Amino acid sequence: MEPLHFLVVFLTLGVMLVGLAGTVIPALPGIELIWLATVAYWVFTGFDRWGIILLVLMTILLIIGEVVSFFLANTTAVKTGASWQAVVASLVLGLIGMFVIPIIGALIGAVLGVLLVEWYRRRNWREALRATTGTVWGYGLSIGAQFVVALLMIGLWGAWVFGEWWLNRPTV
């Protein structure tokens, strides 16, 4: 592998690891960043035919990851009694919290959104806490799903890079 290609592989992996961290840390992009790093690597390697196959697979994984993440977060919240108003408040306060208190603000805002709306709706702290707990579980499952998809995406890209190297290695 020539030095420039090695540098691009190293930088791409670094960006992907930031994306992996982003599946757990709300202030960072997650699987979307991994997908973008794959696209950039594909462009650098000259749009080879294996790259387009990988890109299609990565796009499918990205879509699956986003849908599963959204589904887990919202259905778990609703199953434990959170209303659609609480889910919306969770999203809005989570976004605001992300900018007010970096890294943990999104989680604090999301939890407060559900807790306050459900308490206001029901005037019962126990039911509000039940809905909030379900929301936290849903977000936890969502993060876990995104993390697994991120690992799959990085592994798929790694197999592609290794395969490229193996096919193009110097022979004796």
Image (cartoon, rainbow, N blue to C red):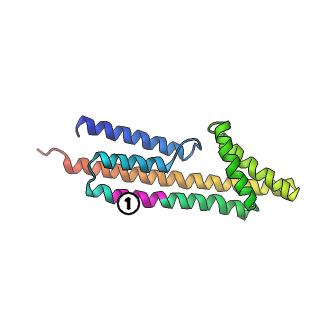
Q: Which residue is the extreme one toward the right?
A: 123
**Residue at x-position 55% and y-position 56%:** 145
Q: Secondary structure at mark 1?
A: helix
In the image, residue 43 lies in the stretch drawn in magenta: no
Chief secondary structure of the magenta portion: helix
* Displayed quadrant of residue 105: top right
**Quadrant position of the N terminus in the picture:** top left
* Residue located beneath label 1 in the image: 56
Q: Is residue 31 above or below residue 60?
A: above
Q: Is residue 71 left or right of residue 56?
A: right
- Residue 61 in the magenta stretch? The answer is yes
- Give the number of callouts: 1
Residue lying at 27% horizontally and 40% vertically, measured from the top left = 5
Image height of 82 relative to 40, above or below: below
Name the foreground residue: 120 vs 139: 120
Amino acid identity at mark 1: Val
Q: Which quadrant would the C terminus be assigned to in this image?
A: top left
Where residue 87 appears, as percent x and y from the top left, is: 71, 57
Q: Residue at x 57, y 53 (%)?
A: 144
Is the residue marked by circle 1 packed among few (<14), some (14-19), or many (20+) residues within 10 Å? few
Q: Which residues are magenta?
A: 53-62
Residue 136 placement (x, y as % from top left): 69, 52
